[in-house]
Image (cartoon, rainbow, N blue to C red):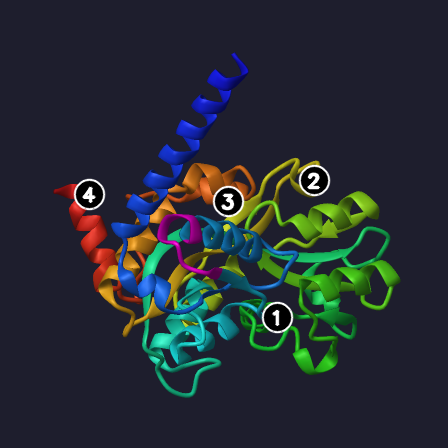
Amino acid sequence: MRRLHTRILAAVLVAATVLGLAACDQTAPEWRQEERVIASGTPTGVYFAYGTGLADELAAATGATVVAAESAGSVDNLLRVASGEALLGFAQGDAAADAVNGTGAFTDPLPITAVARLYDEYLHIVVRGDSDIRSVPDLAGRALSLGAENSGVNVIAGRVLEAAGVDPSTLTDARLDLAGSIAAMRRGDIDGFFWVGGLPTPGIEDLARAMPVRLLPVERSWVTAVNERYSDAYRPADLPVGTYGLTESAPTMAVPNYLVTSSSTPDALVRDAVEVLFDARVRIAARVPAAALLDRRQAIFTEPVELHPGAVRYYRDLRG
């Protein structure tokens, strides 16, 4: 009986190896020519968790070495993808629109294309629960973190403060990433911080369990004002009851985020990446709930960022 079990196990391992090799043979040979990087944000955010899951799945499907790289966020990711330092990257829709138009943080248009629209991210304006800060205008004169330099958070923070009539020059801005902002909040070094991410963001969940926090409301009129002045990428939204222990929903703004690549990336690589992205959705979502929001019908809506031809081929093949 023991020998029978050994033979069965050996047969299963051989079959798995054959299937794995077959899967690799069906993907583009360019995958295995060099290490592939996914620009993925701060380690305590959703981007990094999503990027790590996607990197693992791409490595298993293609036989390539694929890694998720820490970064400052959307602007940094877009720069890395455009330069060829990263094959794929996560980016907020507003930052991606600025990149292709050469506006905002970008002095010239970048050769960026979209792979898929993934899910919506939500603006978080987090303050200490025992503070007297009740609204965004109350932030004037305070010590805050408006996000790391070259992050999408920093882009949105400046736009919302402007819409709310708060002069950023009156603030003391620590310019921290999410992990740094959370640590500074715990120490009492800052009164609050801005963050843009999926729900729930793990680092903020941990912070809310460790100390009382509040999330400031974002007025719809501010969302309208930001849309009118910038890329029209935003929509009013609510942080739902129960998120971070909220006892009532908190009005905020949401922005879609995209998986992006360079316009020069070979079509076959992009088509493989999109296929793995969707095929592995459930497995990645077991670790990253936001991944469950990926939807084939919505994934193509990435305007004004054009879909990469390899992604277009995947979506057309689905319809065919």
Q: Earlier in the sequence, mark 4 or mark 2?
A: 2
- Residue 187 has which mark? none
Please report whichever mark, 1 or 2, sits nearer to the chain's N-terminal start: 1
Q: Work out whether mark 3 precedes mark 1 in sequence or the reverse, and give the earlier one.
A: 1
Query: Badge 2 is on which residue?
Result: 246
Q: Badge 1 is on which residue? A: 161
Q: Which residues are magenta?
A: 59-66
Pick the front one: 260 or 29: 29
Q: Give the residue pinned by disc 3.
A: 290
Q: Are marks 3 and 1 in contact (CB under 8 Å)?
A: no
Q: Earlier in the sequence, mark 4 or mark 3?
A: 3
Q: Position of residue 305 (x, y in %)?
A: 31, 67
- Are there few (<14), some (14-19), or many (20+) residues within 10 Å of tag 2? some
Callout 3, which amino acid? Ala
Q: Taking 185 as reference, is 77 left or right? A: left
Tell me the kind of residue under disc 2.
Leu
Q: Are marks 2 and 3 in contact (CB under 8 Å)?
A: no
Q: Quadrant of the C terminus?
A: top left
In-front residue for pair 146/62: 62
* Residue drawn 62% across the image and 63% down it: 42
